Structure formats: C-alpha cells, structure tokens
Image (cartoon, rainbow, N blue to C red):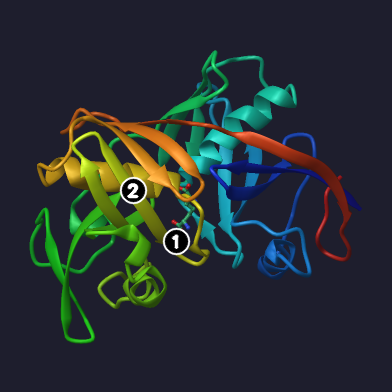
Amino acid sequence: MKLQFTKMQGLGNDFMVIDGVNQQVRLSTSTIRQLGDRYFGIGFDQLLLVEPASRADIDFSYRIFNNDGGEVEQCGNGARCFARFVHDKGLSLKKEIAVETARGVIYPRLEDDGNVSVNMGVPQFAPQEIPFIADSDLIIHPLDIDGVSFAISVVSMGNPHAVQVVADVDVAPVASIGPKIETHPRFPAKVNAGFMQIISRDEIRLRVFERAAGETLACGTGACAAVVAGIRRGLLNPRVRVHTHGGELTIAWAGGSAAVWMTGPAVSVFDGTINLQGEEYAA
Ligand SMILES: N[C@@H](CCC[C@H](N)C(=O)O)C(=O)O
C-alpha cells in the first residue's frame, strides 16, 4: 500500500506529516521508529497525523509521535506545520482552526504575513499536572543530579517541561545534563529539558533537549514553557522573542489563566510516497 506524506519544518524542528483524513493509516511503533531514522528512513523529529475530529465543534484531531515511536501530548512547531498542511492540502479553507490534541484543544491561525500563530492553551504548574514528584507547588524547584542541585521550573504545555536559566546557552551542558533531567526519577513520564539564557526582559536564547528526540533545532512548547517560567520568575515581560538554533519565535503570555500564544514560521519541504507492507497500511 502507498502512503503519501509531506516533509515539513518549523524552525528546523522537522516533521513527517500524514493526511489521515483521506488515507486510512495504521503505523506500528517500530515502523514510526524506522521512518524517523535519518539514515535508513525519511528522518524527522516528530511524525504528525491529521485525523478527523471526534466532535462537531472541532476541525481536526492532531496526533504526535516522537521519532522513537512514542505518542505524546503536544508539539508547538508541529501545530504551526499542521495548520499550514491542512490549508495547503485543501483539507480546510479556514484561516483559523480548532484542533483537538491528547491534552486539550489548540487554535492555530494562518497570518497574512505567512507566519502561523497558535493559541497553545493555559500553562499548568501543579506537580501532578506535569507530572513531577514534589511536596509543594514552587516556582523554582531544586533538582539533584549527581550531587549537584539545579534550579528548575516545571511547566506543562500539555507536555512536560523543566526549564533552567543558564548564563550562556552556547556552553550550557545540554548534551550531558539534558538526558539526566529527561530521565530523572522525579519525572515519571520523562520531561523536555530547556536551557534558557536571558538577553533582556524581551528576548531570550533557548536550547531544548527534547524527550525521546534529543536536542532539536527548536522546540515550540519548550519556547512557551521557557517564557512562562521566565515571566513567573519575574525575569521577562509578557511578550518575548525567543532565539533558537533554527530561528526565531514570538511567545506571549499575560499570566494567570491566560492562554500562551506562539507565532512563527511553518514550511513545506517536499511531498513523498512510501510503500508499506504487512499490517501497516494507508488506503
Ligand atoms: N518539538 C516539539 C515537542 C515534541 C514533543 C516532545 N519531544 C515531547 O516528548 O513532549 C515542539 O515544538 O513543541
């Protein structure tokens, strides 16, 4: 059976996007892992599956898989690519759509300048929402790694994030400490580890060691989580430019129960077709 897909990227965070509205798609964990392999497959950080919504007031359902085959709750750069995909492929003529994810509804909007803005929902901080093992709901938690205490803020943007402030992201221990935070026993579902350098109250630099995917060129939910953490710590203004290795995002949050807004690019790279065998199919 043949499966059509589009390769997309948002700030270099790259995706295999599949239309599951017009194709019947069933992919096993091991097939997703194989497709995600940059040498033996197509190569991507996440696979995004567009499916019909389960309710009349929602336009689509959005499923996200890391390149290890595991399904996750949310993906910010993917949300912008999702909106660009459904529009460019004629699945929706709307400029603003409602999309259900594993953890709530998000609202992407195509802007006239080509960017996509997304209402990413309200951030959560309670330890059980992350999930994070802690006695109390603090803005900064000490996290012990090999006898060294790291000051982290925990944020759920649907998916879990641990954010720390560093002096210089270029020399931050992303590769060595990132995996230790990701798999720390106080994060039962693992976590995305963000390293944020504050440039000014309106501008940060950010690197994220993503859960399962490793360090990516950018992480949209990581950018939302970092800005929210910085605002809660009193370090940032409500609207912040986030510089990543893959480019720039704007994140806005008014605090409290306000939703986080993310604005940035979403780009199609190429369309392709693959053959699937056995139990996997697209029809
Ligand atoms: N790249 C994404 C986040 C993808 C999921 C993440 N690795 C997780 O496991 O939660 C983004 O742009 O937000």
Q: Does residue 163 lie above or below 122 as drawn?
A: below
Residue hosting label 2: 205
Residue 193 seen in this snapshot: no
Side of 147 relative to 65 (left or right): left
Element under disc 2: strand
Label 1 CB, ligand 1: below 8 Å?
Answer: yes
Element under disc 1: strand
Front residue of 173/228: it is: 173
Looking at the rendered image, the quarter that the C terminus falls into is: top right
Name the residue: 75% across, 69% down. 39
> Mark 1 or mark 2, which is nearer the start of the sequence?
2
Label 2 CB, ligand 1: below 8 Å?
Answer: no
Q: Quadrant of residue 202?
A: top left
Q: Position of residue 265 (x, y in %)?
A: 54, 32
What amino acid does circle 2 point to? Arg
Name the residue: 20% across, 39% down. 200
What amino acid does circle 1 point to? Glu
Q: Position of residue 256 (x, y in %)?
A: 15, 33
